[in-house]
């Protein structure tokens, strides 16, 4: 989480605690209770708490802050000078995160009409692609990502998502090319290196796959997907010692070892 996001969250929590503290002091510790202060503090606490947690509307302004931070590399400077459009974008993103894909797509289609710059198109179309991918509408997801690349071909996360969609669509070689581009643009991405390694396993190149998988683990040792890919790659290469090592590591980090072993036991070394 970025520093600015942490500061905003801390400030919001501090305000809620402050108002709650005033209430507690007035109710239990003050020599003479100030009814007006208790009423005002209680009302402010309730309104602020409901607004910031989104209990009433099932949508919180904090969601926007957290999601904007999570997807900052995709959103970039999207709708920087268009607050209504940015608010719609974040509403669409929040609906996507809440798995309300059809509603999210409707909002994102609306905000797409306001797109002017590459970051605008990138963010809207990326989240549309995410929704279509979750709905198993892979061709539509692929179309969204292709359209992004017409406006912005230098975003590693877009290429990574494109690789995922192509892989799901069983376009193995094309997915490898997309992941290679993602790694080229962001060589220090554990996720991109891991997925490129997985794609190389799909096209039966375990030795090449292993290089990227180990790079992913060098960047992020707790990358569970990369750990499972390492076990699979070593199995293909006939290295039983390392296969077992990464199986155990997979379990250590919370992976389903029994399922991984079923996959590994079905593999014949090359």
Image (cartoon, helix red, strand yellow):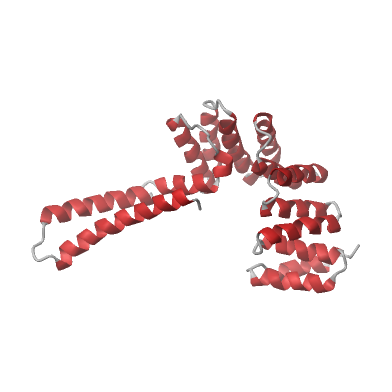
Residue at 58 percent across and 43 percent down: it is 73
Residue 237 vs residue 149: left or right?
right
Residue at 32 percent across and 56 percent down: it is 14
Residue projecting furthest to the left: 32
Quick check: 36 above or below 158?
below
Residue at 69 percent across and 71 percent down: it is 249
The image quadrant where one finds the C terminus is bottom right
Residue 243 vs residue 186: left or right?
right
Given residues 242 and 169, the one toward you in this image is 242
Quick check: 59 above or below 267?
above
Where residue 236 appears, x then y in whole percent?
A: 86, 63
Residue at 84 percent across and 55 percent down: it is 208
Residue 170 seen anywhere in this rendered image of the structure: no
Q: Give the number of marks.
A: 0
Given residues 208 and 202, the one toward you in this image is 208
Where residue 233 appears, x then y in whole percent?
A: 81, 62
Where residue 94 appears, x then y in whole percent?
A: 49, 44
Residue 1 seen anywhere in this rendered image of the structure: yes
Residue 72 vs residue 26: left or right?
right
Task: State which quadrant residue 17 falls in.
Answer: bottom left
Residue 174 vs residue 129: left or right?
right
Where residue 19 appears, x then y in whole percent?
A: 25, 56
């Amino acid at each position: 989480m970025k520093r600015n996001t942490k500061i905003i969250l801390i400030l919001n929590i501090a305000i809620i605690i402050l108002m709650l503290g005033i209430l507690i002091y007035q109710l239990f510790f003050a020599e003479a209770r100030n009814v007006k202060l208790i009423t005002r503090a209680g009302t402010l606490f309730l309104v602020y708490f409901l607004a910031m947690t989104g209990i009433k509307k099932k949508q919180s302004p904090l969601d926007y802050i957290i999601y904007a931070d999570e997807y900052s590399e995709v959103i970039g400077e999207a709708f920087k000078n268009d607050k209504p459009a940015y608010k719609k974008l974040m509403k669409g993103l929040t609906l996507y995160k809440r798995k309300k894909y059809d509603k999210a797509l409707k909002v994102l289609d609306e905000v797409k009409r306001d797109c002017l710059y590459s970051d605008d198109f990138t963010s809207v179309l990326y989240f549309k692609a995410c929704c279509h991918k979750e709905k198993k509408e892979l061709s539509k997801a692929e179309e969204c990502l292709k359209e992004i690349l017409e406006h912005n071909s230098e975003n590693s996360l877009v290429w990574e998502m494109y690789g995922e969609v192509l892989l799901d669509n069983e376009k193995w070689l094309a997915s490898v090319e997309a992941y290679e581009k993602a790694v080229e643009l962001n060589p220090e991405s554990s996720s991109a290196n891991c997925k490129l390694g997985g794609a190389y396993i799909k096209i039966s190149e375990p030795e090449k796959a292993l290089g990227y998988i180990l790079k992913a683990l060098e960047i992020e040792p707790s990358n569970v997907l990369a750990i499972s890919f390492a076990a699979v790659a070593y199995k293909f290469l006939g290295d039983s010692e390392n296969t077992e090592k990464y199986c155990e590591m997979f379990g250590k980090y919370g992976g389903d070892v029994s399922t991984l072993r079923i996959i590994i036991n079905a593999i014949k070394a090359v």
